Amino acid sequence: MSLGFSKISIKNIHKAFGNNIVLDGLNLEIQKGQSMVIIGASGTGKSVLLKNIIGLLKPDQGSIKVNGEETVGVGWNRKQKFLKKVGILFQNAGLFDSLTVWENVAFPLMQDKSFDRKRAQKKAFEKLSEVGLASDTANLMPAELSGGMKKRVGLARAIATDPEIILFDEPTTGLDPIMGEIINELIVEKVQQLGATTLSITHDISSAKKIGNKIAMIYGGKIIWIGEVSELNSSGNKYVDQFIQGSAEGPIQMDFKPC
């Protein structure tokens, strides 16, 4: 694994929705070949950060560089060039209901004019096999799949273009513990095979420890702690300790509304 320079450099990112400040000067450096996991409670800005990175949202202020190139505020052609390097596994797989399984996997390939439909289909079948799905799955519709199968299809699509960077949005949400562990193992295996740089967001501590080699915690719109997986249980940070222990007592105060 080659480390040493920032594959993704996030500096002083701010994002607010009206008076709701979600990201407040967030900084994060992700080195080439690193598997970074961001943990944090619901509503702390994990998904907002991910959407800013891929351009679904534009930060109010700050810089996001990939391979040293700025991605904030760039034109569509430069954004497409960046997105070709990126694979994404969405929280609920994000499959297109009107497309078959193989067409979902092949979708990013067919956006590239160098892939015709036949070649894209062949690559899709290969990727489905890599995530443990039989060939007879390829012509099914997403509605015919279980939750675990949808996640596998989503992972196959995320790696279809052999990306340099893979983003994982809550990869084990909605799965039982066994299927969650299967997905975690598939993620680790595929990332190692590709040599990709990854950024994952999750509130699942067991998943974070499995798929990451570096963990950061977001709170108050900032990264408040970052360290190796082995340092998580002895972070010395009271926010991190409360979160990983799942304790109601501590500095993290959640908003509760009476029923």
Image (tube, grey):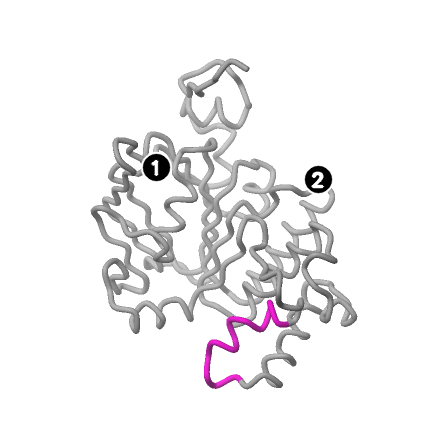
**Direction from residue 127 to residue 226 in the image, left or right:** left
Locate residue 221: give its quadrant: top left
Q: Dot 1, crowdedness within 10 Å: few (<14), some or many (≥20)? A: some
Q: Residue drawn 68% across and 68% down?
A: 128
Of residue 9 and residue 13, the one placed in the foreground of this image is 13
- Looking at the rendered structure, the kind of residue marked 1 is Ile
Residue that label 1 marks: 223
Q: Which mark is residue 1?
A: none
* Farthest-out residue, left: 61
Q: Residue drawn 50% across and 47% down?
A: 213
**Direction from residue 194 to residue 51 in the image, left or right:** left
Secondary structure at badge 2 equals: helix
x%, y% of residue 56?
37, 55
Q: Which residues are magenta?
A: 103-115
Magenta stretch containing residue 113, yes or no?
yes
Residue that label 2 marks: 177
| Comes first in the chain, label 2 or label 1 | 2
Secondary structure at badge 1 equals: strand
Please identify the quadrant where the C terminus is shown. Answer: top right
Magenta stretch containing residue 5, yes or no?
no
x%, y% of residue 142?
67, 59
* Farthest-out residue, front: 98
**Direction from residue 183 to residue 253 in the image, left or right:** left
Q: CA distance from mark 2 to mark 1?
A: 28 Å
Q: Dot 2, crowdedness within 10 Å: few (<14), some or many (≥20)? A: few
